[in-house]
Amino acid sequence: DREFALKVVEDPEKNKNKTRKELGLIDFTETEIRSGVSGSEIILTQSNIAQLLSLPNRGVYKAFSPAS
């Protein structure tokens, strides 16, 4: 992910082959939207939104072919 890649680029020789935890980053479990509001950190995830809306937490993929 981008956060991990940016951390490795800071010092490639020192940070190469290190884990997220070794670089001081939070373990990746799912995509997050992070925001700072009034000095509080807010983290939204797909599972948070699904739970809030009482929806199943699963992806949807629909393929279609345009009419000719």
Image: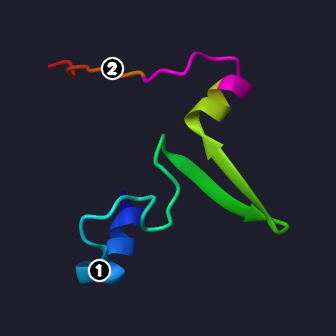
Front disc: 1 or 2: 1
Amino acid found under the numbered disc labelled 2: Lys
x then y, percent, for residue 13: 23, 81
Q: Residues within 10 Å of mark 2 (few under 14, many from 20)?
A: few
Q: Find the magenta span and give its range.
A: 51-59
Q: Residue at x 57, y 16 (%)?
A: 56
Q: Is residue 25 above or below residue 51?
A: below
**20 and 29: which one is in front?**
20
Q: Residues within 10 Å of mark 1 (few under 14, many from 20)?
A: few
**61 and 24: which one is in front?**
24
Q: Residue at x 82, y 69 (%)?
A: 39
54 on left or right of 30: right
x then y, percent, for residue 10: 35, 82
Q: Is residue 20 magenta?
A: no
Quadrant including the C terminus: top left
Report the Cα–Cα distance between label 1 and label 2: 43 Å
x then y, percent, for residue 3: 43, 65
Per the image, the residue denoted by label 2 is: 62
* Residue 61 figure quarter: top left
